[in-house]
Amino acid sequence: MTVEVERTATARDPEAVAASPAVVRRRNRERLHALDGLRGVAAFVVVLHHLLLIAQPVSQPPGEPAVLSGWWWLERTPLKLLTAGHEAVIVFFVLSGVVVVLPALRRIDFSWPGLVVSRVVRLILPAWAAIVFATVLMLAVPRVPQQVTGGTWLAGQVQKDWSWQHLVVELSLMGSSVPHDNVLWTLKWEFLFSLLLPGFLVVAVLLHRWWVPTGLLAVGLGVAGSIGGIPPLEYLPIFFLGVLIAVRLRAIEGWSESRRAKRLLAVLLPVSLLVLIAQFLLAPVVPGSSVGGHALIGLEALGGAGIVVAAGAATGFRRILEARLPQFLGRISFSLYLVHLPVLATVTWLLGDWNWPTAALIGVPLAVLTGWGFFRVVEKPLHGLARSAKRGASRAVERYVRSDRTA
């Protein structure tokens, strides 16, 4: 309805023809700023999540946390949003579905080969640099077993020694885990989504009028993937939800300006946040290892999509995300995501996990500072390289197609 109203106004008023592109560009910039801020907040939540994993073995009593204890407040109340790392990754996946597809929606002659090449440069090369960075820290600060509690996440899942074999395998980013820098497991799904994006976009455009059942079907597939332990079915539908939101984004913004919509959005955001962490809130009655627990994990995609919609709509939440601090974190979010864990792990191995408060006071600011430096030195220069690679790939394919036609 909103799009048709804009077209009618443009046809009747010549001045609207000149004004409309500026309005659309302004709205797109505002909306994308908010999504950048949301990505920055999510990246910082991942930092706090790994800090919690470091502190957990030496500060949390075994078993279910006692009601009203410190860990109960952190794990069984909405405060869990501050440290919900896996859930923040779900928000990342939905955001990728929105942001990556928007250029394709704005240009009829969009180059899919150019997109793939650009994504390789923007995802793979910074990841390789992050693995090298983690390896250097590992060699600089030896991982002495006595410095961390045995059998913990830090002792068992973070790389403790170095070898060429491990390094070569992890540089592929296609394994189930990347012990040098654990967070890099998500990049496999980001890249696979890039390859599947044309099909996702076609389906989303064809079914955009039935966006509610289509979105619920995607959520249902994710729940089935979580219950069945099928990672592609669990994660790829989350990206599709983002693509569906991108296709509906202008309609969402126009709808969100009405009073009725603002009342609905005021409910959507808190409900979505609670759905995102429902598995933690309901853990005492629905164990995470049960079918119900896995179903709740699958439903996190629904919460993530609702949060992204609230960020893209004309709401107070969007204005908060456009503030200076979320925008700064959003600018360095990918770099912060890539390098924070090697920094936190190294500081903890150096000080011992029993000194986790000191490790936190040093490690978190140092991780943010390192993320900013990594952005300036590695990620930002690669943006230009990615744009050049995109243009080069597009021209190469175009030349090949033309030469084949004239042959």
Image: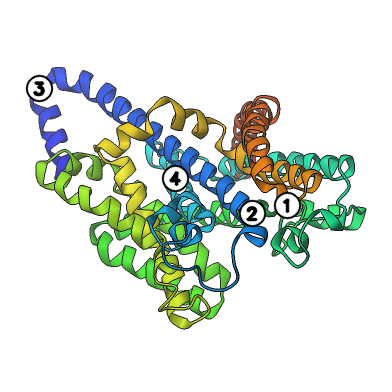
Nearest the eye: 141 or 261: 141
Neighbor class of circle 3 (other Cα within 10 Å; few <14, some 14-19, many 20+) is: few
Residue 115: percent from left, percent from top: 56, 42
The mark nearer the N terminus, 3 or 1, is 3
Sequence-wise first label, 2 or 3: 3
- First in sequence: mark 4 vs mark 2: 2
Left or right, residue 187 beside residue 10: right
The residue carrying mark 2 is 55
Numbered circle sitting on residue 353:
1
Question: Circle 1 sits in a helix, a strand or a loop, which is it?
Answer: helix
Task: Classify the position of the C terminus by image quarter.
Answer: top right
Front position in the image: 180 or 354: 354
Residue topped by disc 4: 101
As measured in the structure, the alpha-carbon distance from the residue carrying label 2 to the one carrying label 3 is: 63 Å
Which of the two discs, 4 and 3, labels the residue nearer the N terminus? 3
Query: What amino acid type is highlighted by mark number 4?
Result: Val
Residue 45 percent location from the top left of the image = 51, 46
> Dots 1 and 4: beta carbons under 8 Å?
no
Q: Which mark is residue 13?
A: 3
- Tag count: 4
Of the residues shown, which amino acid type is indicated by label 3?
Asp
Q: Seen from this angle, which residue lies furthest left?
A: 12
Amino acid beneath label 1: Asp
User: Which label sits in the foreground, 1 or 4?
Assistant: 1
The answer to whether residue 127 is above or below residue 304 is above
Element assignment for label 4 = helix
Task: Find the distance from the CA under tag 1 to the CA under tag 2.
Answer: 7 Å
The reply to whether the C-beta atoms of the residues labelled 3 and 1 are less than 8 Å apart is: no
